[in-house]
Amino acid sequence: MAAAREIIRVGTRGSELALWQAHATEELLRAAFPDVEVVRCVIKTTGDRRTDVSLSQVAKSEGTLDKGVFTKELEIALEAGEIDVAVHSLKDVPTVLADHFCIAATLERAGVRDALVCKVEGGLAALPEGARVGTSSVRRARQLQWLRPDLQISDLRGNVPTRLKKLSDADDYDAIMLAEAGLERLGYLPNSDERLFYDVLDEQTFYPAAGQGAIGLEIRSEDAWMRAVVEAIGHSDTMLRVTAEREFLRLLDAGCHTPVGVFSALDDEVIHMSARVFPEAGGEPRLASVSGARNEPLEVAKQLFETLV
């Protein structure tokens, strides 16, 4: 490793969940590099600023491609040298980055599944006919409509506490969809409050997003010292799995408007992958499942792409 620096500047969004992720990263950095000062820089992104319209409309109105509505300002700060590493929920990061940026490491992954938070007990099957479900994700919306065509899907923006408050305090929604990882990290799982019921959906029934549950660490590609630093705190098995999942999205040329569910699992020397892809124009999803050598995640992702039916 090159000569050590005196300070590492960590860039993050300002939501409660983003700050939790930044704190987890900072604690690992301090433990691994006790002689380096770790400083947090909170940056407001386009997605945080524009909560008045759906995410797809934010991207269109702001001229931001893919899921860059939550990463653009962090990358501007990274490029300018104002921060050394940007901490992301990896599922919010565009599949293809500019050459001068890279996801150099990921922290150990939390749960990958989606959770249905309801006002009634019993999960998806217990929702009454025509129930109103809030989500900002086209992937979640299309899977819900596929599993329960009677449901009414409504756009829902805001951070995790805000969304839960909208569910519990108003009659606009009967249920909402959130990521298991975020609920775990903020202490909502495994316990639920007396007004809401949390049902975590099996990933083989309700396919999660690529990279869901993973914290991605983005750096300047040429910053060799910072690459070595984040690799030192990274989790190799998580990195392997998300590399395969994100490569599948890249091959699919999938953006934030494409309803895609994909997940992976490691078993000894094997990586297993499954995908469910809904056509943007509507219709039945395409499905695929493959297995391959764990040390060849890009090749396994290619096999999954070529196997879609």
Image (cartoon, grey):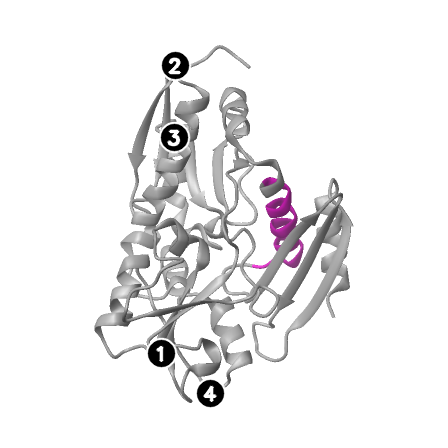
- The residue carrying mark 2 is 35
**Label annotation for residue 27:** 3
Mark nearer the viewer, 2 or 4: 2
**Label annotation for residue 120:** 1
Gap in Å between the C-alphas at discs 3 and 2? 13 Å
Which type of secondary structure does the marked residue at label 4 adopt? loop
Earlier residue among tags 1 and 4: 1
Q: Residues within 10 Å of mark 3 (few under 14, many from 20)?
A: some
Gap in Å between the C-alphas at discs 3 and 1? 38 Å
Earlier residue among tags 3 and 1: 3
Left or right position of 197 against 217: left
Q: Which residues are magenta?
A: 239-254
Mark nearer the viewer, 2 or 1: 1
**Label annotation for residue 150:** 4
Q: Nearer the viewer, residue 279 or 171?
A: 171
Instruction: Tell me the kind of residue under disc 2.
Output: Asp
216, above or below 209, in the image: above
Report which quarter residue 272 is drawn in: bottom right
Residue 58, given in percent of the width and then of the height, sits at 36, 60
For the question of whether residue 142 can be seen, the reply is: yes
For the question of whether residue 64 can be seen, the reply is: no
Earlier residue among tags 3 and 2: 3
